[in-house]
Amino acid sequence: MRTSLLLLIILLLSSCQSGDPTRSEKQIEVFTWWTSGSEASALETVLETYQNRYPDVEVINASIAGGGGSAARPVLQTRLVGGNPPDTWQTHHGAELMGQYVMPGFAASVKDLYDAEGWYELFSPSLIEMVSKDSEPYLVVLNLHRSNTLWYNKHVLAEHGIPMGDALSIEELFRIAEEFQNTEIAPLCMGDTGIWATGIMFENTLAGTIGAERYQGLWNGSTRFTDSDVMEAVRTYGRLLNYQNDDHAALSWDQAADKMAEGACVFYSMGDWVYGELIRDGLQENIDFGWVAHPGTEGIHILVTDGFTLARNAPHPEETLNMLRIMGERVVQEDFNLIKGSICARNDCDRSRFGPYLQWAMDEYAKSVAVPTAIHGSAAPADFQQSLNDALTDFVVRRDAEAFTEMLAREARASGFGM
Ligand code: GAL
């Protein structure tokens, strides 16, 4: 009797240690950098839908903090190189997807899924091309962000009697900024604990100064980083840096959005993930905050996509394909994007569910030239992206425009696309 009781206890203990075998077999690990308030809740809508539909699968949310993926990507690389991939991970289209994950053989084609789900009809051909190699798509795109929006606090401007129209020129921006300089309210909002955030302001200023065609030329060698119009953009960016909040280097991008929401700074040149944060902060669009294109970028849409891969040799392929299928669904994309501050990648979402900003973003995307972003890895290889971040880190301190543009020109040559 005693022995059988002992045996029973040992059995119970060992089953506790090894866990529930059925549970650990049915798993899926989703790797992202969505940890800010709005990012995490948007992701949660997708994971919850999955969990409700597949209650016996353990969903592991492997998100690593750090806007733009600056901290997540190196961890991911180590895991991929070490043969320990998450089942699916977040990435941007273009150079990042191709150079980091498709060419080295870390991501598998999802063409069968596209065929089975009829996605060739439901996503635009141009978008599918951005995520395909040799006619095989490698990404399920969940959302389309715009990174060249200039946000502003409406109350602060109204209290100072400053009217805002549908567009703002760079000189008008400097004029208004001057009014707030040396007051308690910083003219420009910034949170660049991650250098990429000031990189957005740079990239927006660059596109706004040299225009869509010359901007695109940077990535195929027809525009040189040392050309005079690029130099002018760098100088303008340097001027903008004089107007940002003093504590910018201690804040993350979302903390800077909170600062704008509180009225501690006025304008914020940043992607529309800021919209997600402002809404989460309880602000109302067109009442508490407004927006225009970053000066000079009217008709240009700097496109930041977020999509998910299928790992080659994914530990849980069936669960992963089910997750990707869900990510491509219309209502899932609508629910996610309403919180995230982006627009659907699918072209059949219900427009009426979205508020004024996101409807504006949809219209702008439809009528503008979409150009890639180097800051978010789509325009140029990862080595160049890293050099751009290094050059920015140096520029914000030294403000040496010649050194900055020469370094970029050198790195563009080294990466094989500059002259
Ligand atoms: C981008 C990403 C966006 C947003 C932003 C800030 O790289 O595409 O979805 O999350 O970073 O973290």
Image (tube, grey):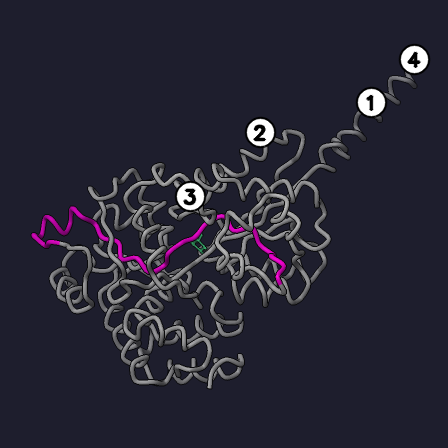
Q: Amino acid at mark 2?
A: Asn
Residue at mark 2: 52
> Residue 14 versus residue 345: which sits nearer the camera?
345
Residue at mark 1: 9
Residue at mark 4: 1
Image quarter (top left, top right, bottom left or bottom right) of the N terminus: top right
As for residue 297 lying within the magenta part, the answer is no
Q: Is residue 239 above or below residue 342?
A: below
Q: Relative to 136, is 237 on the left or the right?
A: left
Task: Name the disc covering residue 66, or none.
Answer: none
Q: Which residues are magenta?
A: 135-163
Does any portion of residue 251 appear in the rendered image? no
Q: Relative to 153, is 203 on the left or the right?
A: right
- Please tell me whether mark 4 sits on a helix, a strand or a loop: loop
Measured Cα–Cα span from mark 4 to mark 2: 44 Å
State the residue lying farthest toward the top. Answer: 1
Measured Cα–Cα span from mark 2 to mark 1: 35 Å
Labelled pair 4, 2 in contact (Cβ < 8 Å): no
Q: Relative to 132, is 304 on the left or the right?
A: left
Classed neighbour count for the residue bearing mark 1: other residues with Cα under 10 Å, few (<14), some (14–19), many (≥20): few
Measured Cα–Cα span from mark 1 to mark 4: 13 Å
- Please tell me whether mark 3 sits on a helix, a strand or a loop: helix
